[in-house]
Image: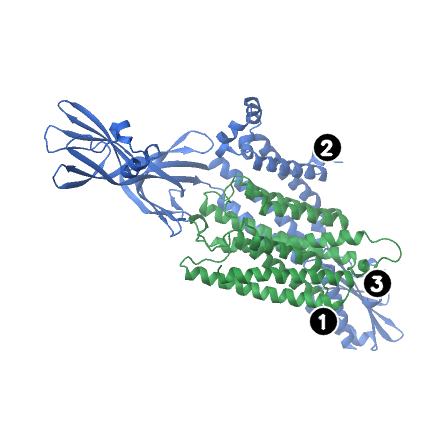
Chain colours: A green, B blue
Amino acid sequence: MIINTVILSWVTFIYFGSAIFYIFKMVTGKEFWGSLASIIAFIGLIVQTVGLILRWFESYKMGIGHAPLSNLYESLIFFSWTIVLLYLIIEWRIKSKNLGAFVMPFAFFSIAYASFSPNVNARIQPLIPALQSNWLISHVITCFFGYAALTIACGLGFMYLLKGLEKGEKPRLFFRLLPGREIVDELTYHSVVIGFIFLTLGIITGSVWAYSAWGSYWSWDPKETWSLITWLIYAAMLHSRFVHGWRGKRMAIMSIIGFASVLFTYFGVNYLPGLHSYF
Amino acid sequence: MKKPLFSFLSSLKLTIILLIIIAVASIVGTIIPQQYEGGEAFRHLSPSLVKVFNSLQLFDMYHSIWFIILMVLLSLNLIVCSLNRWKASWKLFSNVPSPDRKKPFENLPPESVIIIENNPNEVISGVENFLKRKYKKLRRKDADNATYFYGQKGAYSNFGVYIIHLSILIIITGAIIGSLLGFEAFVNIPEGESSNIVHLARQKGVKKLDFTVRCDKFNISFYDNGMPKEYRSNLSFLKDNTVILQGPLLVNHPITFNGIRFYQASYGPTPGGKAHISVRRENEQETTMTVKQKDSFFLKEKNTKVHIVKIETNFMSMGPAVLMHIQNPKGTVRVWVFKRIEQMKDRIPDLIKKVPTFNPGLYTPYYFKLNKIEPNYYTGLQLSHDPGVAIVAIGSLFVICGLFITFFSSHKRLWIRVSEQDGKTKISVGAMSNRDPVGLKREVEYLLRHFSSMG
């Protein structure tokens, strides 16, 4: 095994630890676990960044240099990287560590799937002609930052619904520690906005690329179609908020439905015939 | 009074129903293989089902009448809904409300009111100058023993959502223009040949170009691990038999000629190609030569002629082979010369006895060898002419601008009341915003901090 994949598989364990400690923090309410989880997540992010850079260098050493964004393995690794990066920024901004328990597991699953699934090839492969484009980097980066923001929105949606289970005058400590519903709702909205903008940019960069590679900026390829469906779901969500003032539970449910569509756009489409066969 | 059609088109129900139908249809469209693989799908379906699917245009759903109608309805819905709300937005943008409105000051939280020691007359001009610097078109009104100010910023943010809607309509317009005035086509051109006839996509027949495309050479190269590295077609574009443009066509690097973009889409072997063969007469020197299909040459006996009938890159899965007809006055002998004859003989020891025409030494005293076949390729070109692309591109740029205006700006409206209370000055700040309550709160805090420092 090459050094970068070894490093990246360590990161799987680091993120696992971080996710577990965030859950400890949520259940016990002790700040210690939260701080520990944050520090571990931050260390994981740095190690992962180093791993990604090494992988980039290695590909140049092999004479097939390209950014590590070109196959399922690399996209999964990058997905977890964007989730953790965005999450840590949000944590730093809102100064609350409760969300980690709902977000870090996604980062862990993504990198674990990349590192340990027999279906995912971790080797550095050269770029086939269709992928040899400057649009590769901008397309993948915008899409995955979008996916990451929408993942966080989904985590917030789960958090909101969990908070909704709170009953009685004196709810259990666990519920009281979760942030207030309005804050969660507002955060969900902001995450969806960020995700929606990046998703739009991802679709636009993708169609610019398709225009130079496939002969048409839009060919109703399953991945294109599903990204449009996802886009429409989030557009509907934002409209229902602006026009009809939907808040709270409905937003939480829509952020989860939207995320299911994101997942299908990312993975499910691989089982359908189409042009996006490399991801 | 609203007309029924108008209220139908402006209803949110219509939007939701349309979005659901489009989403479901798109899901169906990604499951049922679309035109490019229709043939594959036919085999798994019963003929009657195929008929139903065909009549609903399900194999080319995204270009079917009903899908286009859905898109048109959605556009109309978008237009009507936007128009419906436009009036209110325009009012918000252009109307400057009266500074002494009561409503903004109702139920003000205590932190939005400050008292400073000085008399109002001492601070009022400082307040006004500060607000003037901060807000263009500041309004002032003196009434009820108090001075009122109204200031606002970011009024343009009311238009963000219209920019997005308008640009989506621009994109749809561009797409319609492209599908009406443009075309997509493909053509396969063997190396060394040229063509000016292309096949239109979706079985719409053929089209004659007013120029000719020639494929001078097709080349494919591989990485060490066998993955394809580059597909390259050297193309020449000719008008009246003169070459106007020449260049290599690669994936991701289309060539535009006469408003038509050419893309490297596929490739494949064509029958024929060049064969490198050796001929040896018993006890004599071997001679090698390169032949093409339909070539012929004489053997040492001047009345014996060898015709190269077929050159196959992979004959009956047994690898490269050449079919020769060796003709002399007595008649014709057919011989298949295989490149891998030795391996074939190892695998099937009595091959030559069973199939005498596979014997490279059938025509005594000669022995033929096939060293190599250089296959001929055809290049598969995709052509597209789309006059709507620029419009779609402009629409996409505007979508991005609109998104940023909508989500990262807000229309902040602030009412400031300066009044006297027991010889001191009381300043209240009421505020409203169409979005971003956090930013609004920060704005109010900033104002109050500044005012209290004036005391």
Q: Amino acid at mark 3?
A: Leu
The answer to which quarter of the image holds residue A141 is: bottom right
Numbered badge on residue B339: none
Q: Is residue B157 in sight in this rendering?
A: no
Badge count: 3
Q: Chain of mark 1?
A: B
Horizontal side of residue B256 vs B73, given as left or right: left
Asked whether the residues under marks 3 and 2 belong to the same chain, the reply is yes
Horizontal side of residue B53 vs A237, given as left or right: left
Separation of residues labelled 3 and 2 (CA atoms): 43 Å
The x and y percentages for residue B177 are 51, 38
Residue linked to disc 2: B4
Residue linked to disc 3: B108
The x and y percentages for residue B392 are 53, 45
Mark 3 element type:
loop
The x and y percentages for residue A106 are 65, 55
Q: Amino acid at mark 2?
A: Pro
Numbered badge on residue B130: 1
Q: Tag 3 or tag 1, which sits nearer the N-term?
A: 3
- Foreground pick, B223 / B9: B223
